[in-house]
């Protein structure tokens, strides 16, 4: 989707709030741009606008507090570091769920994998493309996350997101495809679930993250 030379590498470490402030300060301009763009795109796709968009975004706070409190704290830190509101951050992280109707006309992603016995040395390869609006393609972030405990994470995100496609030091990789489903409930946004999966050190624990939380959309 974008020239690798345009990707900004940001390394963050420490506790959730500190990681967030580091991230927000480093990508402040891109985060604020994404928040503005997504307000327009969500409205264009039939989602809420203005104060209603803020309210819809902030409605995710209770579910995040219950199921992903560290990531809610990290998002609060990102907002503080970037000089924007928590609603802005939630709009970016829940953009897929706030757009109505769901992504269609072919979706936005294609993922592929190659494994043994079809690869040299029985290695595993993951591939991912991302077809999306060019307005948010200007400055993606390659986020390198070091936490006090758990695997280190590298994830390619839209500026402001806490997670997307990526891999970790335990050898776990995650790709993303959107799925259509008539049901859209109250639950964790897709991009938050991806980050929770990347924080895991086994395939089983990553799968459990996808199964054990309420989900706001299908992917």
Image (cartoon, grey):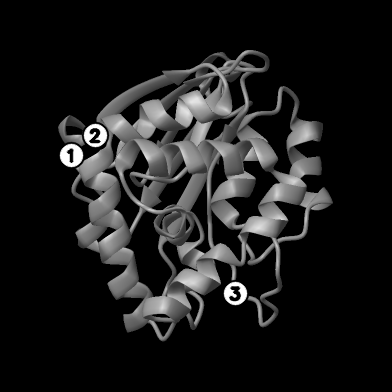
Q: Is residue 74 left or right of residue 30?
A: right
From this viewpoint, is residue 76 visible? yes
Q: Residue at x 37, y 31 (%)?
A: 23
Which label is found at residue 3?
A: 1
SS label for mark 1 = loop
Q: Which residue lies furthest to the bottom in this view?
A: 46
Other residues around mark 2 within 10 Å, as few (<14) / some (14–19) / many (≥20): some
Q: Nearer the viewer, residue 96 or 25?
A: 25
Q: Residue at x 67, y 51 (%)?
A: 64
Q: Is residue 211 above or below residue 155?
A: below
- The residue that label 2 is drawn on is 7
Residue 155 occupies quadrant: top left
Q: Which of 93 and 16 is in front in this view?
A: 16
Other residues around mark 3 within 10 Å, as few (<14) / some (14–19) / many (≥20): some
- The residue that label 3 is drawn on is 180
**Mark-to-mark CA distance, 2 and 1:** 7 Å
The residue mark sitting in front, 3 or 2, is 2
Q: Residue at x 50, y 45 (%)?
A: 112
From this viewpoint, is residue 104 visible? no
Other residues around mark 1 within 10 Å, as few (<14) / some (14–19) / many (≥20): few
Q: Position of residue 91 (x, y in %)?
A: 44, 61
Q: Is residue 212 left or right of residue 153?
A: right
Of the residues under marks 1 and 3, which one precedes in the sequence?
A: 1
Q: Position of residue 170 (x, y in %)?
A: 64, 17
Q: Position of residue 21 (x, y in %)?
A: 41, 30
Contact between labelled residues 1 and 2, with CB atoms less than 8 Å apart: yes
């Amino acid at each position: 989707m974008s020239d690798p030379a345009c990707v900004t590498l940001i390394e963050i470490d420490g506790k959730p709030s500190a990681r967030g402030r580091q991230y927000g300060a480093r990508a402040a301009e891109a985060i604020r741009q994404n928040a503005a763009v997504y307000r327009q795109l969500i409205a264009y796709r039939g989602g809420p606008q203005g104060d209603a968009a803020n309210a819809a975004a902030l409605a995710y706070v209770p579910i995040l507090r219950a199921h992903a409190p560290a990531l809610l704290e990290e998002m609060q830190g990102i907002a503080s570091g970037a000089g924007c509101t928590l609603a802005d951050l939630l709009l970016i992280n829940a953009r897929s769920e706030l757009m109505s109707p769901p992504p269609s006309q072919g979706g936005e992603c294609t993922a592929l994998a190659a494994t043994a016995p079809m690869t040299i040395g029985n290695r595993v390869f993951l591939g991912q493309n991302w077809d999306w609006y060019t307005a948010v393609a200007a400055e993606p972030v390659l986020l390198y996350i070091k936490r006090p405990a758990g695997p280190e994470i590298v994830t390619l995100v839209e500026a402001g997101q806490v997670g997307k496609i990526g891999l970790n030091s335990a050898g776990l990789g995650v790709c993303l495809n959107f799925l259509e489903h008539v049901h859209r409930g109250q639950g964790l946004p897709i991009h938050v679930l991806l980050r929770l999966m990347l924080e895991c050190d086994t395939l089983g624990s990553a799968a459990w993250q996808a199964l054990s939380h309420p989900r706001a959309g299908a992917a």
